[in-house]
Each structure stands twice: as structure tokens, then as C-alpha cells.
Amino acid sequence: MSSSKRITKELNDCLTSPPPSITITLPSESNISLWHITLTAPPESIYSGGKFGLIVQFPPEYPFKPPTITFATRIYHPNITNETNGSICLSLLKTDNWKPSTKIVTVLEAIRQLLVEPQPDDPLETRIAEQYKNERKEFEKEARAYVGRYAKGPVKFGTEAGAATTGGEGPQQQQQVS
């Protein structure tokens, strides 16, 4: 099965059995390899009330190589870099751990779960991980402040593949999941 066939199948699977709180947007109908994800934070998480943009880029070798997934929305989290395009530390996405049988829906659910249960023992942001472990109230205060500052209102993805998007507006095909 070619990369685009597999990606199309997984998109259809996501539409048939949507993961909770996830919206998938294709910023360009001609590029099935680039997805914009809007993830509504789980109500049981410290990020409750926030909407986070994720950018999924499938490589030509998919499913034999993992997709690249970054947070377009800033987030205060030990496993996500604290910058404009936040890299995610998730063992499932590491090249050594990736299995071609892994489906994107599984990855999206794992990222959603990471908002509920950060993994401070495998951090990208050591200072935030230490704060999470040793000063939980301060961590929660800062995480909530980031939600208020960056994760309210329409999700902004910035410029990707020549298309500026803001969570469903503009000339793009929107596939809503959930």
C-alpha cells in the first residue's frame, strides 16, 4: 500500500470512528500528507478549556517512518518544547520505537493522554519537569496561564505549505472529527 493510500485510509478511519475532542483539517486538498489537528484539552486535565493546534506531516516513507507532529499552540508542558513549534516527546513517535502497524489515531489519543498525564521522567523541558515533580501548584498555575494566553479562541496554525489557516477558516478542506 502506498503512503497516500495508507494516509487516506487512516483519515477515513478517523472520520468513521472519531477520537474524542479532535478535529482534522486538510489545509490543501492536494496534500493529504499535511494535517492540521485541533485538540480540545480533556476536561480532567490542567489544560481544560484550551484548544491546541497540532501539525502532522506524514513522510513519503509512511508508515515505515513516523509522522512528524508538532504543537502549533504554545503549551507549558514537560514533554513539549516551550516554543512556537513545540516538538513532542512521545516514545511512540521515536524512530527506534515506531512500528508500521501504528495508526495515527493511536498517536493522537496518546498525545491527548499526555495532556492528562505528563511524563516528567522523559522530558524535553527539564525545568518544567522538575517543577511538575517538586512544585505542582506552581506548575499548574503556569500551565493555566499558558492556556489563557495561547489556547483560547480560534487555533492558529501559521503558514504551512503556503496556506495560512486559523482553525477552519480560509480555502481549505475541513474534515471534522468529533
Image (tube, helix red, strand yellow):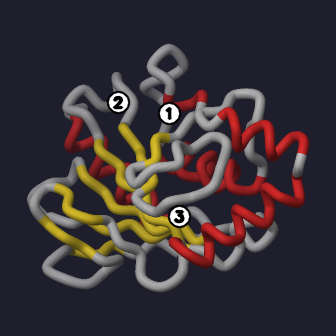
Front residue (pair 178, 160): 160
Front residue (pair 148, 28): 148
Which residue occupies 33% across, 72% down? 175
**Total numbered circles:** 3
Q: Which residue is label 1 attached to? A: 102
Q: Which residue is label 3 attached to? A: 17
Q: Which sits earlier in the primary sequence, circle 1 or circle 3?
A: 3
Is mark 1 in CB contact (under 8 Å) with mark 3?
A: no
Which residue occupies 63% across, 55% down? 76
Is mark 2 in CB contact (under 8 Å) with mark 1?
A: yes
Which label was assigned to residue 63? 2
Q: Is residue 4 left or right of residue 97?
A: left
Q: Amino acid at mark 3?
A: Ser
Q: Position of residue 125 (x, y in %)?
A: 62, 37
Q: Is residue 86 left or right of residue 158?
A: right
Q: Is residue 123 left or right of residue 54?
A: right
**Where does the N terminus fall, quadrant-wise?**
top left
Q: CA distance from mark 2 to mark 1?
A: 8 Å
Q: Position of residue 151 (x, y in %)?
A: 54, 73
Outermost residue, top direction?
96
Kindly report which numbered mark, 1 or 3, lies closer to the viewer in this rendering.
1
Q: Which sits earlier in the primary sequence, circle 2 or circle 1?
A: 2
Q: Is residue 20 left or right of residue 164?
A: right
Which residue occupies 29% across, 40% down? 58
Which residue occupies 14% across, 66% down? 163
The local crowd at label 1, few if under 14, some if 14 to 19, many if 20 or more residues have their Cα within 10 Å, is: some
